[in-house]
Image (spheres, coloured by chain):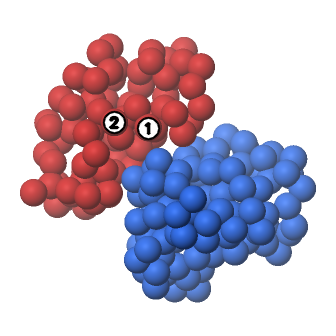
Amino acid sequence: MSDVNTRISDLVTSNDVVLFMKGTPLFPQCGFSSRAVAILDHCGVAYESVDVLQDMEIRQGIKSFSDWPTIPQLYVKGEFVGGSDIMMEMFEAGELKALLDESGVKMA
Amino acid sequence: MPMTAREIEDAILAALPGAVVELTDLAGDDDHWAATVTAPQFAGLSRVAQHKLVYAALGGRMGGVLHALQVTTVVPK
């Protein structure tokens, strides 16, 4: 497995909830990333964020890792959940909170 | 060159016959679109799989030429 895939795999397996995003939760650099942060904050879960703008290798590597063309990307217990749109659809349907509860992830 | 509404709709309809595509220009710049796609092909698929069908229909332009496309997928009742 390539070095970047190993790095990504370590990140998503060593943290319950990981959000790959542009910028940081405090200073999101893109509307979609900002929306993803707002959704996670609303769910009240603890999460690790990875600023892909600081790491070009991860920025490209994450897209092939998940076979998903855009950022942000959410992972729960090592599983790719979706981007900003899917997070919104799931959140509005109550599915995201249910997934997070079922996964027993830590709260913020 | 960003895609026009027409090009986005045509590309999705070509790949997903029978779909209904509703497009909203979020920023008036032909570059930030919201697309609600209702398609029978989505039945039984996960949300990720549904969205991947739409992205595949756009032939890899997602995240590239098409900077920001907000996608909502709907399975027809």
Q: Which chain is blue?
A: A
Q: Using residue B9 as the reference point, say whether residue B50 is left or right of it.
A: right
Q: Using residue A46 as the reference point, say whether residue B66 is left or right of it.
A: left
Q: Looking at the image, which residue sits at the far front?
A: A1
Mark 1 residue type: Lys
Vertical placement of A48 versus B49: above or below? below
- Residue at (65, 62) in percent of width and height: A9
Answer yes or no: is residue A27 visible: yes
Q: Secondary structure at mark 1?
A: helix
Residue A37 picture location, percent across and down = 60, 70
Residue B48 picture location, percent across and down = 54, 39
- Residue at (86, 69) in percent of width and height: A107
Residue A18 picture location, percent across and down = 67, 67
- Residue at (40, 53) in percent of width and height: A69
Q: Chain of mark 1?
A: B
Q: Which residue is mark 2?
A: B56
Q: Quadrant of the C terminus of chain A?
A: bottom right
Q: Which chain is red?
A: B
- The mark found on residue B52 in the picture is 1
Answer yes or no: is residue A39 visible: no
Q: Using residue A64 as the reference point, say whether residue A45 is left or right of it.
A: right
- The mark found on residue A24 in the picture is none
- Residue at (25, 39) in percent of width and height: B59
Mark 2 residue type: Ala
